[in-house]
Amino acid sequence: MTETRTFTDMEQIICTSARLMHADKLYFTAIGGPPLVAVLLAKTLHAPNLAYVVEDGTIAPQVQLPAPMFLIEASGGSYRAASWTDMNTVGFHAGLGYLDYGILAAVQVDEYGNFNSTFVGPAYERPERRFGGPGGANEIASLCWRTILMTRQQGRKFVKKLDFMSSPGFLDGSAGARERAGLPADTGPWRVVTEMAVFDFDEESHRIRLMGLAPWATVDDVVAEMEFEPLVASTLENIEVPGEEELAVLRAQVDPSGRTVRGRWITVELDGESARLVEQEAPAEGA
Amino acid sequence: MTETRTFTDMEQIICTSARLMHADKLYFTAIGGPPLVAVLLAKTLHAPNLAYVVEDGTIAPQVQLPAPMFLIEASGGSYRAASWTDMNTVGFHAGLGYLDYGILAAVQVDEYGNFNSTFVGPAYERPERRFGGPGGANEIASLCWRTILMTRQQGRKFVKKLDFMSSPGFLDGSAGARERAGLPADTGPWRVVTEMAVFDFDEESHRIRLMGLAPWATVDDVVAEMEFEPLVASTLENIEVPGEEELAVLRAQVDPSGRTVRGRWITVELDGESARLVEQEAPAEGA
Amino acid sequence: MTVLAEGTGTFLQPDPDAHRRYIRDNKEKGLVSKVMSEAEAVKRFVDDGDYVAYDCNLWVRGPAALMREIVRQKKRELWIAAKFTAHDATMLVAAGCVNRIDVGWMEVGRVITEAQAAGDVQLFEWSNGAMTYRLLAGSLGVPFLPLRYLGGTDVFKTGTKLIEDPYTGNPINVVPALNPDVALVHVNQCDEYGNARIFGAGLQPVETAMAAKKVIISTEEIVSTDEIRKDPQKTRIPYYAVDAVVHVPFGGYPGTVPGLYKAHLEHLMESGAAQMQGKMDEYLDKWVHSVSSNEEMLEKHVGQEKLAVLKAEETIKEGYYE
Amino acid sequence: MTVLAEGTGTFLQPDPDAHRRYIRDNKEKGLVSKVMSEAEAVKRFVDDGDYVAYDCNLWVRGPAALMREIVRQKKRELWIAAKFTAHDATMLVAAGCVNRIDVGWMEVGRVITEAQAAGDVQLFEWSNGAMTYRLLAGSLGVPFLPLRYLGGTDVFKTGTKLIEDPYTGNPINVVPALNPDVALVHVNQCDEYGNARIFGAGLQPVETAMAAKKVIISTEEIVSTDEIRKDPQKTRIPYYAVDAVVHVPFGGYPGTVPGLYKAHLEHLMESGAAQMQGKMDEYLDKWVHSVSSNEEMLEKHVGQEKLAVLKAEETIKEGYYE
């Protein structure tokens, strides 16, 4: 009774993240890309009343699906919101503690959950690759109670030292480091989601800890794709591969243009709870 | 060719203040009372396009005249505004330097134009008479470029020492006193208008200076109604008594209920530019 | 940067982290109905000793029905933010509900001066702008904000500090954020979740609500969420800040709600006379204690006919309801 | 209170008093018409060396026509606030107009990286929120504001300071106010004096305009002042802040104005391809230098038929125009 399933690394990341979301919490998401797609997937599949705010001041919209092909941040992204405000206003709401979870994508993450979305390369003035900047990630990662980071499982993404710290995790990991830097108490990164793994953070050391694993991957597979050695939980949760309904909704409704979900293809053979990797594409350059 | 004219002290104060206003400046007025009435008189008589903002966030309204009997601060006071905002917003505009003149009423004024609208009496906890508090006067007198204060010419109003300094004039009068207290540079009281006199402030000493006189009053009359001796300008401007058109508009259009313009009656006999006092009521208790 | 001078008065200390924890642990983030009676809302969300901020502009769009309910339930030792408020402060003091008042501007007569002289109520001096600005700070989630007034005057002395601006080196004043325990805001329209619309110039309904721990909205009208979502720009307060939605037509009575009804002048004169004649107890008996709700009060003491007149007298609809 | 840590980067120094003097001496307080062409507005109100802030949300309601006019007039050494901006920053850098960029988020490709490597443009790192917050500070008339982020990260190092909160004693970050020389804001409707209406969620059109010395509004539509006064709550920017009103239908092209027209995807792809292929000069020749106005550009390079399609594709009117 085996079954073969094929999905992209990003589809796995999005599905895993969406499963972490619930209608009784408030989410602060970047204006597009994997974080917004994950939120929309959760709303469509299991939490229709889930509310989120977007950096442009849109509060609790009801985006029509199938989603518009492009420019989700235009009228389509604000459609039937509870309120249209602006960037500062939603920032205030995050500052007040209303926003439970921030959902963000990262280019590089370090072992304390600090992350980079500015540039990679040896020198600021001559970046190997330059990105847009922190955008709203710095404030979202500082002010929301918990942050969910979405990134691919690659050595160049889980680095010992960030080329640039755009946004805060637990900083140097010491107790009270965020508070000493002026950030609100009791906040910080909560999960890092990749196509193979889910990480949380050790309460004492604030070091990243592997706590969930895709059924087709091993701890060694994960650690091989990191520059540093993570902590590993004594029991690892099983991350289910994307279900057929999840993939159908994701591909047909939430990201019909395929712009966000695209990535390297992974094919697994499922047998109950276990799964065997059949094939996976190599990571694309710069993905 | 003499003519007899009768008006209240407050009508004189309002007419004199209104004549100081021009359509190319912006005014910040208290929400009702003599300051608002003076602005409306100026708009009706000589500056129809004069724009003002009110503490409740109303920007540049066009109040229908005759004015509603009561509650000018309700829909009537916001009618056909250019914008409806809120108290903080108009405060920001004042802070940015957009508001040229603040128009305010004062219970007590001292020789540096500091004023009181909180209480009079020997002790804060047991006031002889308690008023509403500074309201918006502190911010208006701090942030507008110039302040026009309206008050009656009475010894208990022009005091050596305020019972309470609700709002700033030139503080202790020393150079830079306002700046040292954190207030914006180059601001301060500009005119104090009474039924008998107009005062400005000496540029060096910041002391109040008599600069205009009603034709029926003398310098001694004015000084007799002050606890301290003001400076006196070398040439005194003549303050015209309220004109017939001014009074007609004021009484029939701007304050038809008579709630604001009421006061002690003054009757003068006019002969060209000069005027002779025929009769004046004694000040009312507590007015 | 140094503190150059500071007030030494009493004020509610800012504690943004404690406020955040309250919001995290107590606010309903889901879309659930919060519609309840004024009695239930005040019972559940106003506690003795609370700091209460309310939004009004003298007699304009104030939460008068909620105020009367506070009197009816005999709440005690409240601390109120008296910004631009008329007879509400007097009524709460007369009823023995309030023992501390932060003053911006309020109508003051013998009730408050006598209570002050007797030591039953303490006043702390600010200004309207300072109070609305402190609530702005509270609604931004920061512990203080700089501002360019208050300095040099006696109202500086309550809780303002003069510091050296870290950027320009010039002296500048800062005031502490205010995060009230409760906010009372009367609005024009609201859905069952608390998404609220406010029409007209206003003092600061939004900052008052957003700065507070507990938020009670009274509304002239409940509209559907579908209606709210059709015009998201009109929503000034988002549902997640709101704990109770109380449907109270004429909830601003005896004051006015622009576009809907005029203030009831005879009532205002009656309350003024009650104060001057030392008959506030009778006034409160009639308007608060002898009835169980705003609806009953209107029915018994105002009457449909008069209410229709107050509606008809409010001839200006432009900008509000058309 | 002490400064615990501070950034050492370059930023526009706040000077609220100088800003106030500019406003006092240069702003028109009377109700006078400010309608003029995009060419005149940019000629009069954008100077070489100015700090320019503009409001957009990626391709949403940006002042694209004004941007092209800046390129056309070859303005030089501008410093821009790149908050949530897409190809505008790239275009200005490609055209040689800009040599300093405060970064919140911008689309970055080879044009900007190459200019940076060549030393033609300097980037200063903030975040979207920090930039909008700095403009908020500028629009409040204060020299700085406290905020609870930036700390501990590399974006702290530009111009943030960590100070001891004078009230709680805890560390808190402060950022300098930003008062740009020029603000460019594209709006839905505006009267001849500059009273402006903006529909939809927005980045921060209001703070951007209010913080600036000179304000150029481009508008899809000019409405009468009578119309403005009928619905004062819709006015987001008051006339006295505005120096120029430029009537530019499709002024946000190739971006979208929600409720009116969709973004022109082919154009965006053309500009992306031009960058990748090193053909920005050709792109600028076609879309900017070969025409004298937005109107001529639309006529020559887009055509009425395509414009009609972009309008028709914007099917969502709800909340904007109905």
Image (spheres, coloured by chain):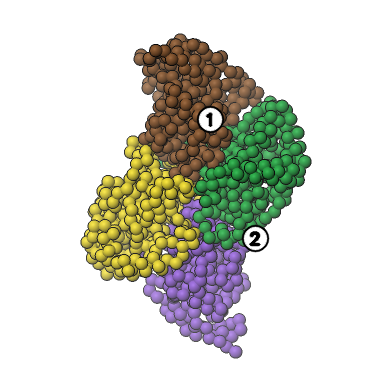
Chain colours: A brown, B purple, C yellow, D green
The percent coordinates of residue C229 (x first, y second) are: 45, 46
The amino acid type of the residue labelled 1 equals Pro
Residue at (60% x, 59% y) in the render:
D224
The percent coordinates of residue A196 (x first, y second) are: 46, 17
CA gap, disc 2 and disc 1: 51 Å
* Kind of element beneath mark 1: loop
Residue at (51% x, 23% y) in the render:
A10
Discs 2, 1: same chain: no
**A14 relative to B109, above or below:** above
How crowded is the residue under tag 2: few (<14 C-alpha within 10 Å), some, or many (20+)?
Answer: some
Instruction: Give D228 or C119, whichever is nearer the viewer.
Output: D228
Query: Closer to the camera: disc 2 or disc 1?
Result: 1
The amino acid type of the residue labelled 2 equals Val
How crowded is the residue under tag 1: few (<14 C-alpha within 10 Å), some, or many (20+)?
Answer: some
**D16 relative to A180, above or below:** below
Q: Given the current orientation, which residue lies at the most extreme right position?
A: D290
Instruction: Give D287 or D3, whichever is nearer the viewer.
Output: D287
**D178 relative to A206, above or below:** below
Residue at (53% x, 86% y) in the render:
B4
Task: Give the number of the disc on residue A29.
Answer: none
Residue at (31% x, 66% y) in the render:
C304
Q: Which residue is mark 2?
A: D32
Task: Give the number of the disc on residue A256.
Answer: 1
Which chain's residue wears label 1? A
**B286 relative to C198, above or below:** below
